[in-house]
Image (cartoon, rainbow, N blue to C red):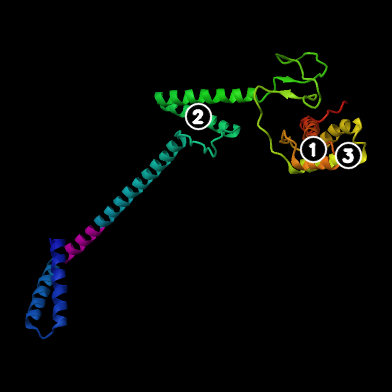
């Protein structure tokens, strides 16, 4: 039985010598080599033609079998890779990642940023607790407790401890505190709330000052400025004008434009102390809460 490998070598020899002979047909060496290769190849084919065909079919069948085998192997590897990718995605979805520290845009720690820091420390504390990081858990736990205490103190400081409900010298109770109100509606009007610490001043509206100036000008031009009616009407007018405005930042010192306006409607004896006294009344009126409607 002719070996398929031997037949393949003889066929390759025949092909190469034939090509050399065609390239140089007058070369006797090339012609002899081609004759020898042709004789050898034909001898193999003639002597064992059926076996050669059978061997070729067998080799072809074997090659197909190998192809099927490797396709099956590749498909299995692909399926396994897909399973691994799905498992990795599942594990990543259950993985607790460390929280991202919030950005503190200012040196002043406002209430919103404080709440963000508390939330960050809380989630970080829970993360390290689940991961078993004892040192980090303790550090973030202590920090979280401190931030929460700061938040509670701020909340307490932002709530009033007393409120003026009388100007007649009677002590009034508010919560657990008792105060004696200061007499004088200009300095301490009804509804004035007292706090442990000074409260942050809200944003002032420029329109409010124009409203105040207009109210003063209207009163001084339509009423007897020497009469008491002006000063009784002024707080009510200003409070009504500011009722729809946000809580303003009202300076303690009388603004120059208000002082000039009052001066323009006053006599020669008018001075800075007079202007400041009037401004105290205006300021108290603008800061006082709007009167509640009785139903």
Nearest to N terminus: mark 2 or mark 1: 2
Residue 73's place in the image compared with 135, above or below, is below
The front one of 8 and 43 is 8
| Residue that mark 1 sits on | 244
Residue drawn at the location 88% of the way across and 30% of the way down = 232
| Residue that mark 3 sits on | 220
Q: Which mark is residue 19?
A: none
Per the model, the C-alpha gap separating discs 2 and 1 is 40 Å
Residue 7's place in the image compared with 278, above or below, is below
Question: Can you see residue 129?
Answer: no
> Magenta residues?
49-60
Q: Marks 3 and 2: CB-CB under 8 Å?
A: no
Q: Please name which of the two marks, 2 or 1, marks the residue nearer to the observer.
A: 1
Nearest to N terminus: mark 3 or mark 2: 2
- Locate residue 16: give its quadrant: bottom left
Q: Please name which of the two marks, 3 or 2, marks the residue nearer to the observer.
A: 3
Q: Is 51 one of the magenta-colored residues? A: yes
Residue drawn at the location 40% of the way across and 24% of the way down = 135
Q: Is 146 one of the magenta-colored residues? A: no
| Residue that mark 2 sits on | 121
Q: Residue furthest bottom?
A: 26
Nearest to N terminus: mark 1 or mark 3: 3
- Locate residue 116: give its quadrant: top right
């Amino acid at each position: 039985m002719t070996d398929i490998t031997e037949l393949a070598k003889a066929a390759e020899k025949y092909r190469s010598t034939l090509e050399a002979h065609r390239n140089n047909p007058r070369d006797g060496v090339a012609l002899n080599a081609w004759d020898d290769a042709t004789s050898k190849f034909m001898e193999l084919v003639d002597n064992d033609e059926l076996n050669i065909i059978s061997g070729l079919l067998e080799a072809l069948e074997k090659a197909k079998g190998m192809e099927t085998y490797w396709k099956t192997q590749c498909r299995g590897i692909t399926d396994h890779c897909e399973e691994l990718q799905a498992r990795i995605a599942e594990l990543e979805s259950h993985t607790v990642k460390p929280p991202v520290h919030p950005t503190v845009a200012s040196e002043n720690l406002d209430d919103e940023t404080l709440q963000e820091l508390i939330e960050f420390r809380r989630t970080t504390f829970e993360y390290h607790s689940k991961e078993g990081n004892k040192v980090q858990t303790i550090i973030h736990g202590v920090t979280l407790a401190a931030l929460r205490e700061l938040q509670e103190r701020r909340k307490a400081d932002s709530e009033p401890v007393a409120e003026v409900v009388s100007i007649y010298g009677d002590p009034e109770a508010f919560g657990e505190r008792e105060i004696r109100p200061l007499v004088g509606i200009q300095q301490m009007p009804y509804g004035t709330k007292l706090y442990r610490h000074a409260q942050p001043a809200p944003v002032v509206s420029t329109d409010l000052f124009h409203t105040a100036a207009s109210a003063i000008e209207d009163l001084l031009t339509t009423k007897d400025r020497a009469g008491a009616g002006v000063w009784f009407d002024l707080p009510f007018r200003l409070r009504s004008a500011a009722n729809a405005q946000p809580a303003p930042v009202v300076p303690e010192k009388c603004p120059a434009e208000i002082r000039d306006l009052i001066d323009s409607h006053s006599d020669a004896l008018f001075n800075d102390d007079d202007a400041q006294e009037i401004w105290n009344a205006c300021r108290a009126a603008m800061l006082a809460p709007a009167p509640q409607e009785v139903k």
